[in-house]
Image: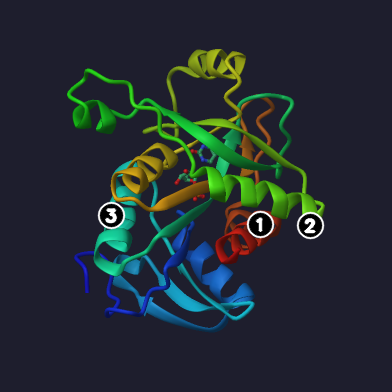
């Protein structure tokens, strides 16, 4: 067991999908994996391992926000030898060119979090980016499956509810497609410990139009994102 994950050594696959929502993890495991077994219920942050097309894959909930996601990414890599982490999350679209339920692969993640400022002593604005190989594979997989996937930069924000929507408009002017709450930390930790990471998102909320999906939809219906992530994980 690590501090926050109740798995024994060897119970977690080298390739892990990471939704923020632990019930999305359960749905993915039950829907897509064969012989899925739950290896952790610590804090109800469920983790499962099974096989997808004959390859061992795990799905681990990571919670909301960078402090929580950082814990799971750190322990998966350092305590369980995970080398491939693919976040499968929900996000808010910042631009009207993006529609509700669209799929986005995050090439890089800006952030308003202070975590990397502390890491680099306030002297460097580190640029957290996706693993190029995973991103290239995900683009190929999406094309093969006929799934339209946007590829571009996103924002990982500390707060879900912002007092500064004007900054979201400015970010959109600079090409930032969407906001979520984990990827800057995921990309940074993966880089630090020599693992590969990619974030794939489904638009659950539209910041410009106010449209939103239900919590049940966020849990159980983002199938295109999950299919791209699974095919990418085993490639
Ligand atoms: O749906 P998940 O993966 O949790 O991702 C998004 O949803 C949560 C906010 O509702 C944040 O964790 C955000 O990043
Ligand atoms: O608007 C949204 C939707 C999902 N996740 C976020 O962080 N923001």
Q: Residue 3 versus residue 163: which sits nearer the camera?
A: 3
SS for dot 2: helix
Q: Residues within 10 Å of mark 2 (few under 14, many from 20)?
A: few
Q: Tag on residue 74?
A: 3
Q: Count the marks.
A: 3
Mark positioned earlier in the residue sequence (3 or 2)? 3
Q: CA distance from mark 3 to mark 1?
A: 24 Å
Q: Return the residue found at the far right.
A: 146
Element under label 1?
helix
Whether ligand 1 has any atom under 8 Å from the Cβ at mark 3 is answered as no
Nearer-N-terminus badge (2/1): 2
Cβ atoms under marks 3 and 2 closer than 8 Å: no
Reading the image, the residue beneath label 1 is: 228
Task: Report whether residue 200 is seen.
Answer: no
Mark nearer the N terminus (3 vs 1): 3
| Vertical comparison of 138 with 162: above or below | below
The span from disc 2 to disc 1 (Cα, nearest Å) is: 8 Å
Q: Which quadrant is the C terminus positioned in?
A: bottom right
User: Residue 80: percent from the left, percent from the top?
Assistant: 30, 68
The residue positioned 21% from the left and 68% from the top of the image is 2
Quarter of the image where one finds residue 35: bottom right
Q: Is residue 209 above or below residue 63?
A: above
The residue that disc 2 covers is 145
Image coords of residue 89 (percent x, y) = 53, 49
Q: Quadrant of residue 1?
A: bottom left
The residue sitting at 36% across, 79% down in the picture is 11
The x and y percentages for residue 126 are 34, 26
Question: What's the distance in space between the residues labelled 3 and 2, CA to CA?
Answer: 32 Å
């Amino acid at each position: 067991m690590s501090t926050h994950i109740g798995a024994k050594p060897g119970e977690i696959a080298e390739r892990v999908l990471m939704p923020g929502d632990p019930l999305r993890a359960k749905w993915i495991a039950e829907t897509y994996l064969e012989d899925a077994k739950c290896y952790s219920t610590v804090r109800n942050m469920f983790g499962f391992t099974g096989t997808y097309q004959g390859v061992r894959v795990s799905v681990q909930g990571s919670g909301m926000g960078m402090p929580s996601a950082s814990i799971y990414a750190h322990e998966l890599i350092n305590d369980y030898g995970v080398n491939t982490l693919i976040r499968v999350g929900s996000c808010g679209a910042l631009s009207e060119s993006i529609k509700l339920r669209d799929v986005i692969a995050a090439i890089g993640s800006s952030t308003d979090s202070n975590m990397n400022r502390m890491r680099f002593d306030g002297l460097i604005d580190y640029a957290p980016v996706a693993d190029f190989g995973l991103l290239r594979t995900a683009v190929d997989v999406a094309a093969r499956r006929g799934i339209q996937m946007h590829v571009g930069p996103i924002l990982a924000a500390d707060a879900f509810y912002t007092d500064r929507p004007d900054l979201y408009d400015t970010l959109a002017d600079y090409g930032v497609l969407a906001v979520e709450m984990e990827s800057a930390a995921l990309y940074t930790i993966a880089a630090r410990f020599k693992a590969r990471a990619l974030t794939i998102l489904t638009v659950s909320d539209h910041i410009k139009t106010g449209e939103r999906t239900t919590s049940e939809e966020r849990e159980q219906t983002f199938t295109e994102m999950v299919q791209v992530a699974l095919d990418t994980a085993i490639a």
